[in-house]
Image (spheres, rainbow, N blue to C red):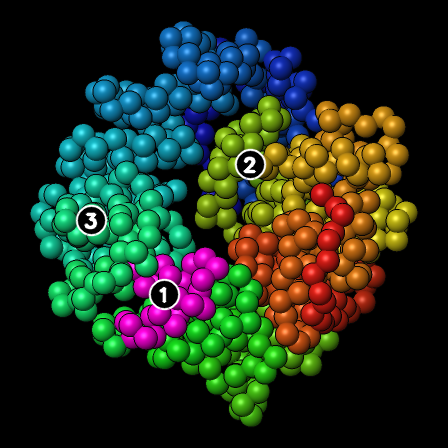
Amino acid sequence: MAPVRYSRVGLWLALSIGLFGCAGAEGPVQSATAAETTKETGTATPVAGAVDLRQSLVAPTQSANAPAASTVALVVPPLARQAVVDAREAMRKKQWSKLQELAPLAQADPVLGSYAHYWLLRQQLQDSTQPVPDAQLHQFMQVNQDAYLADKVKADWIVAAARAGNYALVNKLGPVVSSNAHVDCARLLAKHMTGERVKAAEFLDVFQPNRSCWSTLDELENSKVVGWKHLEPLLRGTLETNKTGNAQRLAAVMFDTLDMVSYAALMKDPKKWLAGRKPPTSRNEIELVTIALSRLAYGKERANNAVYVDNVWSKAIPKSNIEWVWSQFGLVAALNVEQDAAGWYRRSGNARLTDYNHAWQVRAELRQPRIDWDWVAKSIRRMSAKQAAESVWVYWYARSLEAQGNKQAATQHYESIANELSFYGQLAGEELGKTPVLPPAPSAVTVAELQAAASNIGLQRAIDLFRLGWRPEAVPEWNFALRGMSDRQLLAAAELARQEHIYDRVVNTSLRTEKEVDFTQRFIAPFEGRVTEKARLINLDPAWVYGLIRQESRFITDARSHVGASGLMQLMPATARWVAKKIGMKDFTPSSVNDFDTNTVLGTNYLSMVLSNLNGSQVLATAGYNAGPGRPVQWRSKLSAPVEGAIFAETIPFTETRLYVKNVMSNATYYAMMFTGKPHSLKERLGTVSPTPQKRVDLP
């Protein structure tokens, strides 16, 4: 392991006498606020021969076989840590003068002190009315070399400098480690504005609808770097995802003012705008008519509108345009899980569509009572090489080859993904007839490796942030510290997270290893069997419950989603109240929903109710737990014949729910293998989903 750089530590050693304790000193002193927010959420599984390093910053050892390093603890002055806590509150309330007062006090915290200064700088950078504080930013980056905050400041500085027109500075600052579309677009704009060549492809590869990218798009379009051939597919792709606001912004780049009047009218009422219109002749008119016809796919009049398109417009615009229009009819029907989706898609011919549309072209076909496997194969071949290489499409392409009698080619495709520890990797292995097995366990993390992880100043900073409950700051700090780590270092970092009961970091850190795979980390089962106990009390499969929790919250007891779901099993407040009343939980209060016992009792009981309402199908119940129990009932009712559980999962129209179901079912199969020590089939767990008339579901 390379020596750890202690730029922050060195700075504070120079500035403060007695900042470090001697070897073997007690752990860092925390403020009352920090101490009170440190909550244990379960008992961690100990590493053989490991020591508990949760309260220490440890000097790195020379090698994995060297004696355990002496402990050198950073002392955190309580008043300084409290100043950091107060500074964050001031930042959240936009009390900038108060934050200005607290920043010097917070600087005495050798671990988190730079955050207060960063929040001040970020506020100045985001305020376009203030000058960019270049000197302060440069000094901050010098003091915080190689730290996450230095990279964040650099990213924010690049965006602000580009906005201010200081393109030479943007070029001088160079790339950042943790980049994003704002930064990427700002850097491309700076290159273009200082005379360097920017290709349309490299811009389109990073484009996202944000202020930075819109500005770059305007400049590149004015300079003819980006033209109609780039904008047309971008606009169509945006319309396909029904992001009409972004589509209008793109249209304004493509069309002139008069055309934009037409665009607004056709988006409001396409059939009214089309009525009485003559066949278009110019490029712009053809595109506007094409967009208007595509909008007729929406709403309850789709079938009648299709007849209108056929009778009036099918020969009035180019064949490629009308084929795209039919693909939109297919897409909208597929997203409504309607059986006629495949028929519309077949009318789109061999048109090259967006990857998003080709994906739904395949899914629509998979839901057919008689699948046209040749059409599935052709649709996948028309995808971009990058998308076609994804395991989901490799698997279904292999299935199509096998169905057409090309067993040898199918086997090659299955084998290319069968070693992936994923939903489709598992299914590919089963298609090859392989007995599902867990990967061999790596050697245990040593004391020296764990000490080296604890000595990483970035991980230590993240741990302090986790202890304060500041997950938005802690997670990127932790992830930034992992860059460049070897498999052994990642396993040690995951083990450090386990000691701290930061279970999501255990899983996510361990998932980064490439050759050494530790399933006790990747599929951690914390809380000493208490989840299993709750599941078995009501005859639920513990492996399935663990698989669901791993996907819902990564075992974070106080996890809270953007829609308000809480706790390990991510219960919505109304659902929690309803279940508590249903099972007669007398002591339930809304504030107790994050309590381990309350959350798991309510969550497992609700999951059991959903499972019972959906005929015992884990696939349907998993979808119902995420999207609401009425949704899978509706999706199932629109089937015309039984389908494999894998097909039902893959054709769920909600992206979040589709990924969720596949991950939960894959997780559950791995947990079952870990708990029993025996092979388990994902295909058997998925089962078959048969069409059933839609019924009322009396569950929230």
Circle 3 sits on which residue? 260
Mark 3 vs mark 1: in front: 3
Q: Residue furthest right?
A: 537
| N-terminal label among 3 and 1 | 3
Towards the viewer: 570 or 408: 570
Q: Residue furthest front?
A: 276
Asked if one can make out residue 617 in the rendered structure from this viewpoint, the answer is: yes
Towards the viewer: 346 or 481: 346
382 over 122 or under it: above or below = below
Residue 693 pos. (x, y %): 71, 65
- Location of residue 454 by image quarter: top right
Segment colored magenta: 292-314
Q: How crowded is the residue under tag 3: few (<14 C-alpha within 10 Å), some, or many (20+)?
A: some
Q: How crowded is the residue under tag 1: few (<14 C-alpha within 10 Å), some, or many (20+)?
A: some
Could you tell me the amino acid type at mark 3?
Answer: Met
| Position of residue 138 in the picture relative to residue 454 (left or right) | left
| Position of residue 649 in the picture relative to residue 324 (left or right) | right
Q: Main secondary structure of the magenta part?
A: helix
Which element is circle 1 on? loop
Confirm or deny contact between disc 3 and disc 1 (CB under 8 A). no
Circle 1 sits on which residue? 354
| N-terminal label among 2 and 1 | 1
Which element is circle 3 on? helix
Residue 484 pos. (x, y %): 46, 48
182 over 543 or under it: above or below = above
Mark 2 vs mark 3: in front: 3
Circle 2 sits on which residue? 562
Asked if one can make out residue 440 in the rendered structure from this viewpoint, the answer is: no
